[in-house]
Amino acid sequence: MQLLAQGAPDLGVFLDSAQLDQFETYYRELADWNGRMNLTSIIDYPEVQVKHFLDSLTLLPALGGPLPPNARVVDVGAGAGFPGLPLKLVRPDLGLTLVESTGKKAGFLQHVVDVLNLERVEVLTGRAEALAHQPELRASHDVALARGLARLPTLLEYTLPFIRPGGVVAAWKHGVEGLREEMASARKALQVLGGRIRSIYPVKVTGLEDNRVVVVVEKVRATPEDYPRRNGAPRKQPL
């Protein structure tokens, strides 16, 4: 995990040997399971360290301040666990909810959680549109993570209902020109769902020189109970 260990301090993260061993185990499980199912197209050892692990950790400087102790975090569309699981390995105190609609991917996530013996991690198999209406999940998290999930209008409808007022959504995005158009298209969604753009963090990590940014959206008021809409509607008919 040399590239991870070398790059993490640039993000304000200093990993001890036990944490690096956990990341090593995570990589080995990822590579093993990826041979049986399509978890990620990026599986090369050096690339995973940079394009998955370090990329996930860019949340920490993007927030502009430390995550509160024991904060509740939800990763919507968690896939192979990025960015939620790397953040959990760095901040074991966090409570993490991993939302994944594909059963096989959720099975992988639960396996990694068990192998690493992680506490305060819940893997939920289901669609965000349904789970965000459950009373125990709605408006109950401090941070929502969305990496490779959808365009902003759809992404915000998937994530903002999980967040309490005052919490934030962090969305990993690429490109400057395309981002301007995407943000303009999200104005109605922000207004309807109770969010506002707080900041845009340009990622500056060796090996991630492709105009990556983390868009941070603050929830300024409660999301109306009608949202998210029924399964499929946020993507097919974005706000």
Image (cartoon, rainbow, N blue to C red):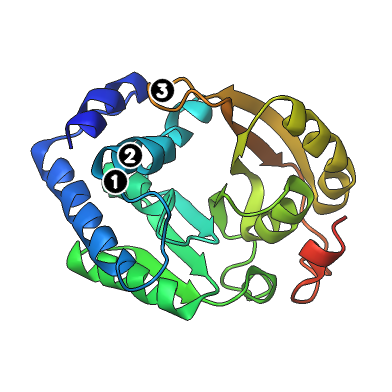
Residue type at mark 2 is Glu
Tell me which residue sits at (29%, 46%) in the image: 44
Is label 3 or label 1 in front? Answer: 1
Q: Considering only vertical position in the picture, is 224 above or below 89? A: below
Tell me which residue sits at (73%, 32%) in the image: 179
On the rendered structure, is 223 left or right of 116? right
- Verify CB contact (< 8 Å) between mark 2 and mark 1: yes
Is label 3 or label 2 in front? Answer: 2
Residue type at mark 1 is Asp
Q: CA distance from mark 3 to mark 2?
A: 13 Å
Q: Earlier in the sequence, mark 3 or mark 2?
A: 2
x, y percentage for residue 121? Answer: 36, 64
Identify which residue, 108 or 47, lies in the foreground. 47
The residue identified by callout 3 is 205
* Label 1 residue SS: loop
Q: Considering only vertical position in the picture, is 35 above or below 65? A: below
Q: CA distance from mark 2 to mark 1?
A: 5 Å
Tell me which residue sits at (88%, 55%) in the image: 239
The residue identified by callout 2 is 47
The residue identified by callout 1 is 44
